[in-house]
Amino acid sequence: MRINTKEGIYLAALLHDIGKFWQRASESRKVLKQQTLQMEGSICPTGKAGYATHIHALFTSEFFENFSSALPQQFDDSTGTVQIGNLSARHHKQNLNSLERIIQYADNLSSGHDRRDEAEDVSNDTHFKYKKIPLLNPFDTVFSMKGVQNRSYFPIKALAADESVFASRDISTEDSKQEDYARLWEAFTAELDKLPSASFSEQVATLLYLLKKYTWCIPSATNSMPDISLYDHLKTTAAIAACLHDSEQLQDFGALPPTFDGLKNEDKDRFALIAGDFSGIQKFIYQLSSKGAAKTLKGRSYYLNLVQDVVLQKCKAIFSVEDAHILMETGGRFQVLVPNDLDKIKEFRRFVAGVNLELRKDFDQVLYLSMGIHSFPAGNLLEENGFSEVVKSAYSKLEKDKLRRYADVIDHKFFEPMPVAGTKGPQICHVTGMDLQDHQVARLHGEDNVIISKKVEEQIHLGRWLRNARYIVKLRKTNPMAGNKEILPLEGLMRGDPENAITYRFLTGEEKELIPGIIRQEHVLQIISLNETDFCAYSSREAGFSSAFRFYGAAWTPDDVEGKTVEFTDIAEDGVNNLMAVLRMDVDNLGELFRSGFTYKAEDLSDKHLGSISRYSNMSEKLDLFFSGYLNHLFSGVFQDDANTDAALTSGPFTKNGPRQHVLPVYAGGDDVFVICRWDLAPQIAKTINLKFKSFTNDHPRVSISGGVSVVHAKFPIHKAAKDAEDAEKKSKMLSDGEKPDGKNAFCIFGQAMGWDDFDLTENFVKQILLWQKEMQSRALLGFLRDLFSEYSESSFQGRWRWRSAYRLKRLGNAYKKEEHMAELGSWLFTGSMNGKRINRLEKTHDRRERLEKAPELVDLTGLTVRWVQSLTRNK
């Protein structure tokens, strides 16, 4: 395979530190060939003590030689033939040529600082510190590590979407990890032989996912803060190197300065960050009637992922860049690092304008792709919190774009009336309410009297195809066949651009036997494995496509009921209440985390450049691992059977396949999650997600998650239920926390917002009331609590509710021979403490001034407790 200069630079940068992986997997440098060791002087710099440093570069050089049959070895440049292994390995030397400087500059810019004073590996090193220190949890370093008691580290193992990849405090930094590295290295090199060789883009796309699978857990450096994965460092270095090369070809910039100081001090904006955001997502997904909503939601949500993927593939094509340039893509938001080529930026803007016109035509101005593009010089990547400021500037421009929708495409035709339905009858989509023309009309399957748009029909099909989907095959074609489970997003726009049109085909595990035939008969671009990192089953040297894996947090779908697609009524079924819940949760203060969490403050930190692009990328990847990866495991695995639910807080029996049959995740990715489930599962799911997120973030006191729940009838309009859940989530995020007016880290259920610790106390209180009520075989206790809350709401803090409650509890105890229990309940209510625990953060539901000035009491929970217990004990 012949490659050009830019491709050679990209590959050299992508693998420039791969030698660190091999070095840590080896007993010593003696595994290298003698001829490689003799190259020490030309590859490794010499340290202050006279010993060679950065020995890993020798491993990088030999790596290319060992895999000469799998990877390109050279390319022709104006200066002659360039050996990629040598170009990749020499980035620590001085007096480099122009191509070698690109790799060195990119390495430094990715790290966010100039060359480190001390190497982590030198020729006389016998301690092998770099083999002992695993990857530090990035949450342990944010906000100057304030509040972090014990650091946590990731296990050295291949990436997976389950709890086995969570960082742990039990992982030692004193013991060698060589054996773990060796097992990982052996698995990595075995899969390198599967890299396709027909096309450079296909090869490096597959290689990038192999690096993600095997180097996500490896620290890029151990002589400074070891919290950046080797994967994120390699990825961002490759993207920066390609941008530097392209900028040299542009007249406005020209050749790079001969020194790194010259580069970091120049004022030429060689880079541009593209930030994209689909606004109107909530309205697009949830503005549905109850008719067909359950069938539509899943596909409607995932359709956005496909549109975003089409936009990103077109962006890559316009700028001639690879996957490493995509820094983030999740939840309708993306960021791409590109060279600041004004002509190509204009071309991409024109394409996005076309996307917005297509979305306007298909979805009646609900969806809009906003974009912000910020150009910046290399020096911005070296400033404290520098890349965060770049992102902030890009999003500032994006917000302005939201305020001037369609400004790039407005002309006299834009204001012409949109076509509406004809005179043959009311042709209005019963799901979205959109007017339809004859050619846009379809019928809901099994209900011929229900009119839907063809786009809604397409999204219903997509939701069905996603159920049990294991593979997504990307095809270059413009004639998708629904019978083959194929979809072409932005169909009208893509038919006019067949060279960039992508049709997506969905296959279950049982249908994987169809893949060889599809490869022979179709123009396959990529085969994606969903939620499985063993993704190279169909990759080979001869393959004309790339292979990848993708985490999809909302992959789980409940089984069909009696052969029909599951409906909200099936999810809500408990035999009594038949209520469903809409649960929304997201990370608190995420903007602050990325904006100021990486700012250097602690004096004992050895790495003052916490705001680097690689650290930013690493944090984004780890968040997505939890929300897109782990949460699917939670929904489909953790809630697989009754053992992981609290029977005391369950309102009725589950279907034969367990609680997960009552859970329908609509979206999980980025930093948020949206779930529809049976009402009694919502607080249990929310609590589990919070506990797992705390474990994932090593219980960082400034990194938290908040959520809210709306409980409604299964036939309640889903868009209204979603809005109620959003309001509940907002209420939780407005819960004060002492001196902090915006404390967040809270949960809201039945209209009551409280801190997570107080939610645990509430659960215990509810369970105790349930137990006593069961023993009493009467609802008299529930009646007492209802009356108590009513009196408490109407009286002052020193009101009559106290003595009246004492009197009624005494009578209840005597009547049901539960004197001891009622006395215990009275002590809890009157002292405000249950088993030594008090309420700390609770939204006051009353405006009495006397109570607002007091700390919350246990009696403040009685209203919520009554609703919860009443719902759990209601019968037909």
Image: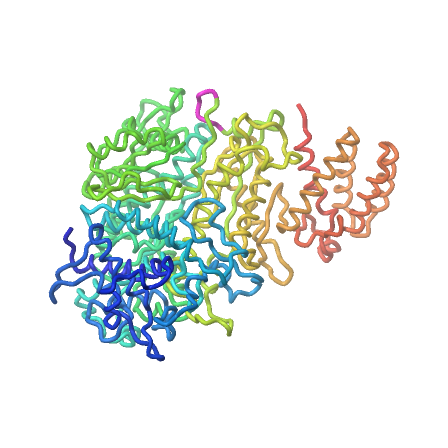
Q: Residue 112: x, y in percent?
A: 37, 68
Relative depth, front residue between 751 and 499:
499
As rendered, which of 68 and 440 lies closer to the eye? 68
Instruction: Name the residue rendered at 38%, 56% in the picture.
Output: 399
Q: Nearer the viewer, residue 315 or 396?
A: 315
Check residue 575 for magenta coloring.
Answer: no
Relative to 580, is 832 above or below? below
Quarter location, residue 29: bottom left
Numbered range of the magenta stretch = 562-567
User: In the displayed structure, does residue 530 sit left or right of residue 583?
Assistant: left
From the image, give the main secondary structure of the stretch colored magenta: loop
Q: Is residue 433 visible?
A: no
In which quadrant will I find the C terminus? top right
Q: Position of residue 318 (x, y in %)?
A: 22, 52
Q: Percent x, y for residue 771?
A: 74, 35
Residue 80, by quadrant, is: bottom left
